[in-house]
Image: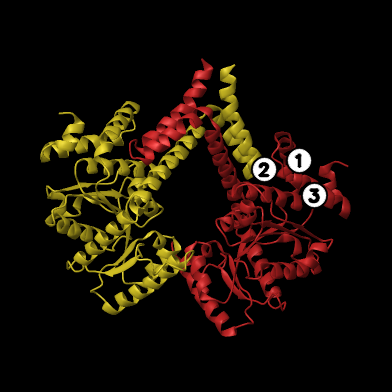
Chain colours: A red, B yellow
Amino acid sequence: MSTLESIVHGAAQVQRRAIAKAITLLESTRADHRAQGDELLTALLPYTGKAFRLGISGVPGVGKSTFIEVLGLYLIEQGHRVAVLTIDPSSTVSGGSILGDKTRMEKLSVHERAYIRPSPSSGTLGGVAEKTREAMLVCEAAGYDVVIVETVGVGQSETAVANMTDMFVLMQLPNAGDDLQAIKKGVMELADLVIINKADIDADAAMRAEAQITSAMRLFGLHGHPDHAHHDKKLWHPQVIQLSALHNKGVDAFWAAVTQFRNLQTANGKLSERRRHQSLSWMWERIDAGLKQAFRHDPAVSALLPTLVEQVESGRLPASTAARNLLAAQSERAQAAIK
Amino acid sequence: MSTLESIVHGAAQVQRRAIAKAITLLESTRADHRAQGDELLTALLPYTGKAFRLGISGVPGVGKSTFIEVLGLYLIEQGHRVAVLTIDPSSTVSGGSILGDKTRMEKLSVHERAYIRPSPSSGTLGGVAEKTREAMLVCEAAGYDVVIVETVGVGQSETAVANMTDMFVLMQLPNAGDDLQAIKKGVMELADLVIINKADIDADAAMRAEAQITSAMRLFGLHGHPDHAHHDKKLWHPQVIQLSALHNKGVDAFWAAVTQFRNLQTANGKLSERRRHQSLSWMWERIDAGLKQAFRHDPAVSALLPTLVEQVESGRLPASTAARNLLAAQSERAQAAIK
C-alpha cells in the first residue's frame, strides 16, 4: 500500500504509522523531502476538508489540556474521531515547551480513535503554523472528523490558529485582568466563543466575567454594522459559556454551541468563504516569507547591507533611499548575470 | 540658489516655494524625479533631526484641528516654528479626505512661522507614510523645530504615525465607548500621552474617563516589567490630560508634559534609540513593499497566478505548494535568462 492509501484506507495501526511518516516528511527541511511532501499533500487534498476545525487558545493555567481531554473523550463517545495538534510558540524559540505535550491528556492520547501530535519544535512561527496546517490536512484525509488546534496565549500564535480553523475559542479564567489583556492584544476579536473555565471555583466572579466579556464582545460586534448585528438570525453572534472542565460540567453545552455555529456557518456560506479566504492568505503569507528569505540570502544584498544599516542608523542615509539601493542591488545582480 | 540652499537658508518666501517644490518632487512617481528626490533628501539629511516630532491621532469629531491650531499658535508665541503634516487614510482610498485640509486651521495656515501640508492624496498607506516622512525631513531642514504629524483614527494610520514621531498623543472624548475601541485596536498601547478633549462639556464624564484610561494604561505598562514600572523616575509613564482646545484651556499643561517627556527621553537615551529603531524598521518596511511589488509585476508570476489562485480556492492545490511554485517561477525566469 502506498502512503496515500495507508492514510486514507489503512487499518488503525497501519494508518497511524502512515500519518506519522507523512507528517515527518512534511516537517523535513530537505528539498527532496519537501518535493515528495508537496506531491503527497496534493494527492491527499481531495480527501480533506470534511472535518470541523476547532481552534482553542488560552494562557498557561487556564486548563486547556484538561478541557481538551474531556472534550475529546466526550466526542469519541458520540462516535467522532479526534485529532489534536499544537502550536506552541515557546517550543519554536527554546526547543522547550510551555505545553509539555508528553505528559498531557493521558487518557485521550492512548485512545485508538484519537491522534495527538505535539508542536514541531523548531522554526519560525510561520514555519510551525505551515507544518501544523499540513498535519491537519493529513489527519482529515485519515478520517479524523474533529481536528482541534490548540495554542498558548503568547505572541501571534492565536492569530495563526484562528487563521487555520473554522471556529476560534478563547479560554479565560473568571478574572477581569485577563480580559483586558485579551482585548489589548486583539484576541477577543478573533473569538467566536469564549469559555470561562473553572467557573465553579468562584461563581460570582464567573458571572461578572461573563457579563463583562459579553458586553465587550457586543461592542466589538456592533462596530461597523450597528443595524443588524443583534437581529440577524442567519449570523453568528459570539457567545460566552461558563464551564468546569475538571468536573466535566458544561462540555455538552459547549458542544451544542459549536454544532449550532457549524450549522449556521454552513447554511449562510460563511464556513466555505472563511476556508477560501484562509487558503489564499496562507499562500500570500508563504510568498512573503519566501521573498524575504531570498532577499536576505542574496549575495549582493548581504555585501551591501551592513554599510547601509550603519548609514541609516547614524542618520546619514534616508531609510527609503537605503531600501531602494538594496532592492536595486538584488535586481541588478540578476540583470548583470543575464549579460 | 540651489533648492538645498533655498530650503536651508532661504528667506521666508523663497524657502516656502523651495519646500513645496521639494515635496512635490518627492511625491512624484517618475523614476528620474525619484532619483533627484533621493539625492536632495540625502543632501538635506545633515540639517534634519533637530525638531521635535509630535504625532497626534483621534477619531473625527474629537477636535484635532481646533487643538492643533491652538497649540500651533501657542508654540509660535513661544518662539517656535511649526510644521503640520497629515496622514489621512481616507484620502488615499477615495481621493476625498475626512480631514478636509483646506478649510482647517485658518489662523495657523496663514501664519508665516507655520507650514501646513495636506495629505498626499493617492497611493497606499505605506506610500503616503513614506512621503509624509520625507516631507517631515524637508521641514526640519528648513528649521521648523516642532513637526506635528496628525492622523484620523482609521485603519493602520496610527501605527504609521507612531512609527515616525518622537511622541504619540491620542485624543479622546470623555466617553467610555471610545476607550474600548482604542484598546481594541491596540492604539492605547502606542500612546505616550492621552488627551481628553472637550472636558468642559461634562466634567464628571471627563473625570471618569481619566480614571478609566489611567487604569487601563497602568495595566498595559505593568505587563512585562511589574517591578519598576511605577518607580523608575528615569522612565516616562504615560499620562492622561484633560483639556478644552476650543476654550484654550490646558494647552500650557499639555506642552509642559511634552517638554518633560522630551527631556526625560533625551536624558535616558530613549529618544535617539527610538529614532534609530524607526529608521531601520522603515527601511525594512520599504524593502518588503518593494519585494511584493516586483513579485506581482513579474511576468512569469502574472502568467501563473490566476490558475493557481483558482486551484487553491477550490481546494485542489495546497496553499504552501502554490506559494512555492510561484516563487520558483519568479526565480526560474531569472535563471533561464542567465543561460
Q: Position of residue B179 (x, y in %)?
A: 39, 68
Residue B99 located left or right of residue B331: left
Which residue is at a point 77% across and 50% down the rendered structure image?
A141
Q: Nearer the viewer, residue A109 or A268?
A: A109
Label 1 marks which chain's residue? A
A25 vs A328: above or below: below
Q: The N terminus of chain A is located in which quarter?
A: top right
Residue B124 occupies quadrant: top left
Q: Which residue is mark 1?
A: A40
Q: Are marks 3 and 1 on the same chain?
A: yes
Residue B127 visible from this viewpoint: yes
Residue A177 - label: none
Give the alpha-carbon distance from disc 1 to disc 2, as whole Å. 10 Å
Label 3 marks which chain's residue? A
Amino acid at the residue labelled 2 = Pro
Residue A226 visible from this viewpoint: no
Q: Position of residue B230 (x, y in %)?
A: 39, 69
**Mark 1 and mark 2 residues within 8 Å of each other at the beta carbon:** no
**Mark 3 and mark 2 residues within 8 Å of each other at the beta carbon:** no
Mark 3 neighbour class, 10 Å CA radius: few under 14, some 14 to 19, many 20 or more: many
Q: Which residue is mark 2?
A: B318
Label 2 marks which chain's residue? B
Which residue is at a point 67% across and 72% down the rendered structure image?
A254
Amino acid at the residue labelled 1 = Leu
Residue B112 located left or right of residue A200: left
Residue A162 occupies quadrant: bottom right
Q: Which residue is mark 3?
A: A19
Give the alpha-carbon distance from disc 3 to disc 2, as whole Å. 17 Å
Residue B205 occupies quadrant: bottom left
Which residue is at a point 53% across and 19% down the rendered structure image?
A337
